[in-house]
Image (tube, rainbow, N blue to C red):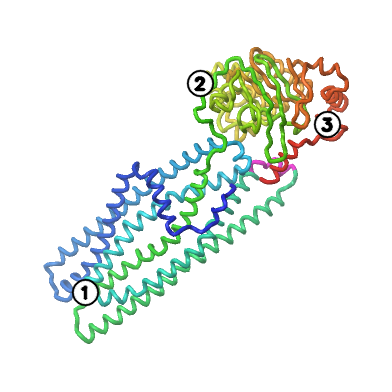
């Protein structure tokens, strides 16, 4: 995913607080009682930990030093109760935080997908789908981890540390001052390691997303991989990505784990110093050992929360990087939204009018230039031209996948830029030249055309698309799973299901972008006959390279380099032997080729623009 220029910048000092505040503002109200329960459990853990250290003074002095046998049962019951409360509180906080975290992940996954559906086609043209999916899957846990670490650090570790330090000061202020001298060097170490790990964490997230995305793309295109014997080359490339991911993971481990030996050495100095000083006092002054034993217990118990708090900053940096990248995606504004106050489109007849339309994918490379024509209501209009002349772009503009740069497009007299996209698209049935099937059954994929369609309507649409025969030959008929991307079906079968999906939509406008390109001659003839019946009474715009499929069109538009150069019926255009259409027809009839000029493929500005976009992806 293309990152904004500031994404590589270092995190600002208060950014963790800002991100946590945003997460809480968006979700806190829904989880407030869960947070209260989790905090109470964590405080109970901290309190019982401090109590364990505090009671050690009475254990040593009262039971062992003064030999008070009458207090043994009471003190043992208190210790047993403390450990039982600690166990129950630990279980309660773990389950509660897990429930909050899992629900947060699910909530953000739904939110991200809903946001992606609002973004325009341009975003997905610029973003590799496999990498995007991998990055989302890896980063979404950062939201959960950021909250969990913050809550456990503040409510458990910070409270435990404060309570244990309080016990230490209560038992011996001088020893407390000596042991707390390790604080400044430990804080300096944490700050230093945090700066080192920040950039490495972001690089690791990005390269892991590239790795998972590349693996996904390779497996999805396995037929091409094997057909072109690319196994070794792709294995080498994947291996390079794996090595890069391993290198960065090792770097993060080296940096983040440096905290453990440093903190252990500092703690060792503190414990050794305390024991040496307290031992000297006991040997020289005859001081009872209970207070010192309680102090050392508190000091040892304080080591774990202190270490976790120190490591928390390192972990927070990782979670912060992930959370920031999720919010970078969520903060992307759709570039092509509905106009303010856009009305619902009211389309009945389906007349389509292009008024001086110009458009280009990149600057200074127009694909359509000053294009004007009318697709009459209830009639079939064919768009022909060389590859890259702008035919598919024309269809994309009609569906508002992109907005025109100049001119306007009207449907039944309504400017489509002033109506909602959803209401416009509900009135259009579209069959692309690259049929796509979703996970699910054959019946599900046809029903996507109109979710309210009955089983009888689905089967009728399949019959009209010449798909019913092969469907009933499948192991489970209409309830047969299609496999990933429909790979269990042939290209022609997928195309016929795509046509059935368009038929069941029952829309007044039908767009056919090379709808029969994947069919053999016999199947194409059957589908063309079915389409002829379906197109009756509907405004149909057909894009075709094979001119034999548009001979019976009511109106033919000929495009060349993004401009309308000819229009008319098949008979009128063929009457002029020097027309572009007649030349295309002769080339196809004589050579059986696509639309070419002088035996070479025509390369238009639109084709060059699309190639430029491909190089930039």
Residue nearest the viewer, comparing 542 with 299: 542
Q: Can I make out residue 442 in this image? A: no
Query: What is the spatial separation of the Cα atoms under label 2 and label 3, in whole angstroms?
Result: 44 Å
Residue nearest the viewer, comparing 336 with 223: 336
Q: For mark 3, what is the residue?
A: 596
Q: For mark 2, what is the residue?
A: 452
Give the residue furthest to the left: 70
- Dots 2, 3 in contact, CB < 8 A: no
Q: Residue at the location (74% across, 17% down)?
A: 555
Q: Is residue 354 left or right of residue 330?
A: right
Q: Residue at the location (63% across, 55% down)?
A: 241
Q: Which mark is residue 291?
A: 1
Query: What is the spatial separation of the Cα atoms under label 3 and label 1, in whole angstroms?
Result: 96 Å
Magenta range is 219-227
Q: Is residue 100 left or right of residue 40?
A: right
Which quadrant is the C terminus positioned in?
A: top right
Comparing labels 2 and 3, the label whose residue is closer to the camera:
3
Which structural element holds mark 3? strand
Residue 226 falls within the magenta-colored stretch: yes
Q: Residue at the location (76% across, 15% down)?
A: 552
Residue 437 falls within the magenta-colored stretch: no
Q: Position of residue 435 (x, y in %)?
A: 65, 30
Task: Tell me the crowding category of disc 1: few under 14, some 14 to 19, or many 20 or more residues within 10 angstroms, Cα based.
Answer: many
* Vertical comparison of 611 with 83: above or below: above
């Amino acid at each position: 995913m293309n990152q904004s220029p500031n994404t590589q910048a270092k995190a600002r000092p208060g950014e963790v607080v800002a991100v946590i505040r945003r997460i809480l503002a968006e979700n806190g109200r829904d989880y407030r009682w869960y947070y209260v329960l989790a905090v109470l459990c964590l405080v109970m853990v901290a309190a019982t930990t401090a109590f364990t250290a505090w009671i050690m003074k009475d254990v040593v002095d009262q039971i062992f030093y003064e030999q008070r046998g009458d207090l043994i049962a009471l003190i043992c019951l208190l210790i047993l109760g403390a450990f039982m409360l600690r166990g129950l509180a630990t279980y309660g906080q773990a389950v509660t935080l897990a429930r909050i975290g899992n629900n947060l992940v699910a909530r953000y996954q739904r939110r991200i997908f809903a946001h992606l559906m609002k973004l325009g086609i341009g975003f997905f043209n610029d973003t590799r789908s496999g990498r995007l999916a991998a990055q989302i899957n890896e980063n979404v846990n950062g939201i959960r981890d950021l909250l969990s670490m913050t809550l456990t650090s503040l409510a458990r570790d910070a409270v435990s540390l404060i309570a244990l330090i309080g016990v230490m000061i209560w038992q011996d202020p001088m020893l407390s001052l000596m042991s707390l001298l390790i604080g400044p060097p430990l804080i300096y170490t944490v700050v230093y390691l945090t700066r080192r790990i920040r950039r490495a964490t972001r690089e690791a997230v990005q390269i892991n997303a590239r790795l998972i995305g590349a693996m996904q793309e390779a497996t999805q295109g396995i037929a091409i991989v094997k057909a072109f014997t690319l196994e070794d080359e792709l294995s080498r490339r994947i291996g390079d990505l794996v090595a890069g991911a391993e290198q960065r993971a090792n770097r993060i481990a080296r940096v983040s784990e440096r905290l453990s030996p440093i903190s252990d050495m500092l703690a060792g100095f503190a414990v050794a110093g305390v024991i040496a000083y307290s031992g000297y006092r006991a040997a020289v002054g005859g001081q009872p050992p209970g207070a010192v034993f309680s102090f050392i217990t508190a000091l040892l118990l304080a080591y774990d929360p202190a270490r976790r708090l120190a490591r928390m900053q390192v972990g927070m940096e990782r979670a912060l990087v992930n959370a920031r990248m999720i919010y970078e995606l969520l903060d992307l504004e759709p570039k092509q939204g509905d106009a303010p106050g856009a009305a619902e489109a009211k389309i009945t007849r389906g007349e389509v009018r292009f008024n001086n339309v110009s458009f280009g994918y990149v600057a200074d490379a127009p694909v359509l230039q000053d294009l004007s024509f009318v697709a009459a209501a209830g009639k079939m209009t064919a768009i022909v031209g060389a590859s890259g002349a702008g035919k598919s772009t024309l269809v994309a503009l009609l569906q508002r996948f992109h907005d025109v740069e100049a001119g306007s497009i009207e449907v039944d007299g309504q400017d489509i830029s002033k109506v909602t996209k959803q209401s416009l698209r509900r009135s259009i049935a579209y069959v692309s030249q690259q049929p796509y099937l979703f996970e699910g059954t054959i019946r599900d994929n046809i029903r996507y055309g109109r979710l309210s369609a009955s089983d009888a309507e689905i089967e009728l649409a399949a019959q009209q698309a010449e798909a019913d025969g092969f469907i009933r030959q499948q192991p489970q008929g209409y309830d047969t799973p299609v496999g990933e991307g429909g790979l269990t079906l042939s290209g022609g079968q997928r195309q016929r299901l795509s046509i059935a999906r368009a038929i069941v939509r029952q829309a007044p406008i039908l767009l056919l972008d090379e709808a029969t390109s994947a069919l053999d001659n016999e199947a194409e003839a059957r589908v063309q006959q079915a389409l002829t019946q379906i197109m009756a009474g509907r405004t149909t715009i057909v894009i075709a390279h094979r001119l034999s499929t548009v001979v019976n069109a009511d109106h033919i538009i000929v495009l060349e380099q993004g401009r309308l150069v000819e229009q008319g019926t098949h008979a009128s255009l063929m009457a002029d032997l020097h027309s572009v259409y007649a030349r295309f027809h002769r080339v196809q009839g004589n050579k059986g080729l696509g639309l070419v000029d002088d035996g070479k493929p025509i390369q238009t500005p639109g084709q060059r623009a699309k190639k430029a976009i491909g190089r930039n992806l």
